[in-house]
Image (tube, rainbow, N blue to C red):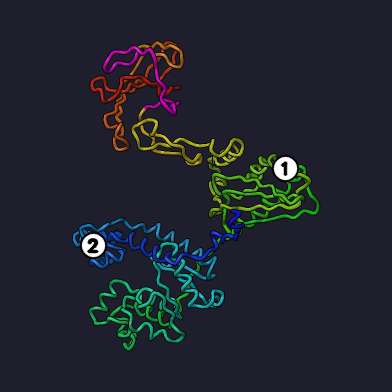
Amino acid sequence: MRELGRRSEAANHPFHGPAQADSHDRVAATVAAFHRAPLALVGKVGRREEVVAACDGAAALGITIGMAATHARALVSDLDIRPSETEADAAMLDQLALRAVRRWSPIAAATPPDGLWLDLTGCAHLHGGEERFCRRLRAFCQRAGFTARVAVADTPGAAHAIARFGPADIAIVPTGRTVEALSGLPVAALRLAGTALVAARKFGFERVADLLPVARGPLARRLGLAAITRLDQALGAVAEPITPRTDEVMPIVERRLLEPIVTADAIAQVMEDLLGDMAELLRAKGLGVRSLRLGGLRVDGTEQVVAVGTSRPTREVSHLLRLMKLRIERIDPGLGLEQFYLAAPHTEPLDAVDLGAVLAGEVLVRDPARLVDVVAGRIGADAVFRIAPVESHVPERAVMRADPVVAPAGWPKWRRPTRLLARPEPLWGVIALMPDQPPRRFEWRGRPHKVVAGDGPERIHGEWWRRDAEVWAVRDYYRVEDETGGRYWVFRRGDGFVEDTGDLSWWMHGVFA
């Protein structure tokens, strides 16, 4: 170091450095490797399964959209066929439309099954012009893992057609040249129904240009009135408004105080005022809250935040105030609180309550949601639950925790103990006659029990599809009663004949009331 001298240079920021030159090639190689195996998505159309989407490799092998799934399997033996998830695709499009409303254009909507509409009127200059925005939009889709084609036109129908059937991945149609851009496209670009496409092929209409010189009356008799409407919408003769995806704003109300407050009574009064304002806001929107967050700003600049949740949507001030008061002790006012806000992060639709039955004198069934909310506010939401049945023969897998408000149904008729242990506990000193007699004596938790009555066995086999260890597993359950009146549910591992079924050990699994 003495010979070289001191050499110290500022390092480049790891996240602000220039992108590697081969990053695009690596991304393209990854996408190509993912689509190396031919892939097709199959959905049920009518009474048969059809191909609803296919990758480029599958399309090159002759797989087309609308082809029967059996025909596709016969045509390509190694075709990777997977079920189409229509609901998941619609949810993804909805999220993309919501992002478009928040980032790109205030008017955006999803066009299932695979498209988005964006109205760039008055906002294209904010993104550097239409051409630059199209490049940025396509780059965003590539980063998200989607292949995209973008088209800008005077009408939504023309943009829809050019994006799907145009020659380029990015197409911008100059104003007033919509007819010229649509003329060379196939008739299917007009979003016609299947019967209209069949009729178009029958009468020799292959391109949109073939439809333009034909009079509207004869064309409507051949293809249907809906086809004429689609053509006029694409040309701009009939308006096609875009119903935008609405970005719901979180309901929030606030209060600024003249003087800071520190007492619990004053904080409770502010809570009541805020809940009254929130109830009016929710009533106007037809919503009910599932969670509320109260924030208080102290004079020293710090913030105190508490939250409550409900098991059902509600906007009843008295009930919500009772829940909020349980959180007052968690608020540290410090030198004083001078500003409050109340937000509803989770809301759900809530219609008006029908009181006709109550006014008619019928007995009102009490809603357990209020009790659940109060108890959950005191001991925690995870501590309040119901037990719901699960389709399983193994007792510890046959129940699950469920929503405490919803009453579970479908309980089996098998007799089960009131208290089922989470894990079976071993028994010691068991005396029993083999192979199918209940135990006469056992020790559990250090205490001996002498059995005076017993019933069984009830044989339960293991669930072999879960793991290999349960292929031959067998349990023989018995209901036994000891001399003090205690009733227990015990079982023996194994059937007493084959060693692979169990080691003949005894276990306690539950206690009857």
Q: Which residues are magenta?
A: 415-439
Residue 430's spot in the image, x, y percent?
36, 13
Give the position of the C terminus as an image quadrant.
top left
Q: Nearer the viewer, mark 1 or mark 2?
A: 1
Reading the image, the residue beneath label 2 is: 68
Residue 506's spot in the image, x, y percent?
35, 19
Reading the image, the residue beneath label 1 is: 332
Q: Residue furthest right?
A: 259
Residue 504's spot in the image, x, y percent?
31, 19
Mark 2 lies on a secondary structure that is loop
Query: Going by the image, does 150 lie left or right of 14?
Result: left
Residue sitting at x 41%, y 62%: 145
Amino acid type assigned to the residue bearing label 1 in the image: Asp
Q: Establish if 356 lies above or below 176.
A: above
Query: Going by the image, does 503 lie left or right of 283?
Result: left
Which of the pair 304/276 is nearer the observer?
A: 304
Q: Establish if 191 lies above or below 405.
A: below
Query: Going by the image, does 9 lie left or right of 268?
Result: left
User: Neighbour class for label 1 at 10 Å: few (<14), some, many (≥20)?
Assistant: some
Residue 435 sits inside the magenta stretch? yes
Mark 1 lies on a secondary structure that is loop
Residue sitting at x 59%, y 60%: 9
- Decide: marks 1, 2 in contact (CB < 8 A)? no
Q: Residue furthest left?
A: 74
Q: Is residue 226 visible?
A: no
